[in-house]
Structure formats: structure tokens, C-alpha cells
Image (spheres, rainbow, N blue to C red):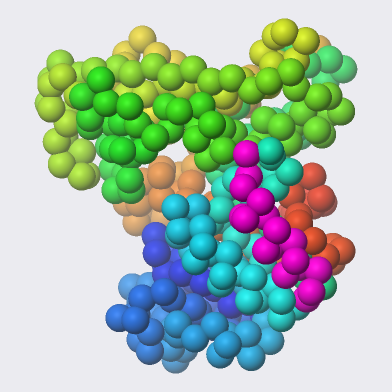
Amino acid sequence: MKRVVVWGTGFVGRMVIPEILRHPAFELVGVGVSSKEKAGRDVGELCGIDPVGLPATDDIDELIAVGPDALVHYGPTAAKAADNIRDMSAFLRAGIDVCSTAMTPWVWPAMSLNPPMWIEPISQACEEGGSSCFTTGIDPGFANDLFPMTLMGLCSEVRRVKALELLDYTNYEGDYEDEMGIGRPPQFTPLLEHTDMLVMAWGATVPMIADAVGIELDEITTTWHKWVTDEEVKTAKGVINPGEVAAINFTINGVYKGETRIQLEHINRVGTHSAPDWARGTEDDVYRIEIEGTPSITQETAFRFTDGSGRDAAAAGCLATGLRALNAVPYVNDLPPGWVTALDLPLIPGVGTIR
């Protein structure tokens, strides 16, 4: 049994912690929080379940002293990079491996757009503590690294591999206005419309795939398109008014020998009727892999809850993301110190999931 500390009781942490408590392969020995208001409260209360007799803490030294096999880190996004680096480095220096979903550019640490001030402290902490750091996500993450690269291993030739996210954000309560421009006028330029920002935030798996198959890309390019609604669209966050952006479509393109050979594409809409001419899955809210090659392959993956809880597809995808990090712990523990990516991990079958 692996003893783990979880950092974060946000959307993902609140879902994963109850799963750890009933999992035969893991023992929850500590929970870290950034909020003073959460510190000292029972973890069960924070997760909306019965008390479990374990108080959350904001004291990193206290969590390190427990001596876990790993920190499973569901902290904030790269927008709070300094906080994430400080917290994770403390565990790594103490010899405790970290499996995280926070800093998605770290899915491929070798990506040239990763700032040195994000990479060097973690490299040094791993060296000092003899520990390892693994970052995953869904996109960027397993939906566009594990899935496409597994399928590419069934081909003799790949002329183009594309990983698509096809999601409706109607029930999504996270940030997308300034980042993606959804709910903004079309003349507004969101952060991610800038090529370097988009590639750094969501494009790390493009150079990862190129490296995995032994090619060096000519360049990485992007495209960005907006769809403006002519009617009111109601969302979990409020209302998108006529004349505002209700869907975006972007691509991140790995160009090799003058042609796009590796491509990530997002079609994110708010409202089922938005952007009717843009691609959809055979179901709503799916991740799809399209390989044009020998043979050509299409795979579509849907994340759903069938337990009657009423939780939506986005929540199911977030839980899967959190569990990918958790289930990786035993395998990261077995690897040499340093950075860990999807290319370093063996098959992770989910020990203890059938019980």
C-alpha cells in the first residue's frame, strides 16, 4: 500500500480524496491546503462526505514529516507557478516523489517555451532529494500523449496524427473569458490567441510526440477561430449575449518537412447549438484521435458518470485526470530521480481498481 499526501481540495481534489479513502492500494496520510480558512477542518467535511478524522493543514513541514511515498498535487494552475514550485520543491528536496496535475507545461519539461525559472528549481530539488516529478493532465496530458502514441504503435506509417478536444463548456465554472475569449466581443484578443502563450499552455505534447518518434519539427504554428452567437446562451456562469463569442476553434500544429504532421485541435463551445458547422463527436463532450496512416485509425473517448450522481462529463474527465496522477505513484516511485513524462512510464493498469 502506498502512503500519499494530497495537496488541494479544489474541484479535482474533492473528487479524488473519497476515492483514495476506499482504495485498497493507497492510504491517505495527509491533506494540504493553501487556504487558512480550510486549515484545521476535517478532510471529509471539505470533500462533502462524513468526517474521516484527518484535519487538513497548510503546514508543509507537517506533511513532509508524515513521510509519504508521494505527494499527489492538485494545486492551482501555472498562473500560480511560484506557489506550485515552492510547495512541490519542498517535498522533492525531502526525497518525496510528486505526481501533479497543476503545471501542464511540465507534461514535456524539455519544451523550449518552459521558462528556466520553472524548470531549474525542480531539477535541483529532484537531484538534492533523489526524487522524481511527474505532471499529467487530460489535455494537455493523456488524451493527447498516451492515447495517440499508443495508437501510433499500431501503424507502419503515420502521415498525420490529430488529437481533438470537443467539449461544451455550458456547465463549466472555470476561467475562460480572458483566457479563451468566450463571452467576450470578437474583437477581444484572449491570452491564448497569442501563439507562444497557446503553445506553452497547451502544446507540450506536440514536441513530445515528435521526440518519441525520432523527428525534429521545423516549427510549431497555431490557428485561432471564433464563432459569435446571434442569440442569448445561458451558462453555469451567467449569460453570453448576442454578438459575443460562444465557441472557439484552435489548432497547434507540428510542422515536419513543410507539412503539419502532428496536430492538436480544440473545439470548445458554450451551448449545444453553437458553431453548428464545426466538428462534433459521435457523442457530445469527447476526446478523439484521428490517425491518417497505414492503417488509419479513429478512436473516441467519452468520460461519464453512471452512478446516478448527476455529475457531468467535465467532472468525469477531471476525476480521470486526478486518478491518472494517483495511479502513477507506484510506478514513479520505481523510476530514477528527475523529471518523469508519459514516455518514462510503463503501462499503468490500475492496481486495486477491480475489488
Q: Quadrant of residue 99?
A: bottom right
| Quadrant in which the C terminus appears | bottom right
Identify the residue shown where x is 75% and y is 22%.
217
Count how many numbered circles sit on residues in the image. Answer: 0
On whether residue 175 falls in the magenta region, the answer is: no
Residue 8 on image: x %, y %: 46, 69
The one nearer the camera, 128 or 248, is 128
| Residue range (magenta) | 113-129
Relative to 189, say whether 337 is above or below: below
Identify the residue shown where x is 56% and y is 72%.
87
Residue 309 on image: x %, y %: 34, 56
Work out whether residue 196 can be spotted: yes
Residue 233 on image: x %, y %: 17, 29
Left or right for 151, reference 321:
right
Relative to 218, say whether 26 is above or below: below
Relative to 228, say whether 9 is above or below: below
Identify the residue shown where x is 27% and y is 26%.
188
On whether residue 127 falls in the magenta region, the answer is: yes
Left or right for 254, reference 195:
right
| Quadrant in which the N terminus appears | bottom right
Identify the residue shown where x is 63% and y is 39%.
113
Q: Quadrant of residue 339?
A: bottom right
SS majority, magenta: helix
Work out whether residue 42 can be spotted: no
Residue 41 on image: x %, y %: 35, 86
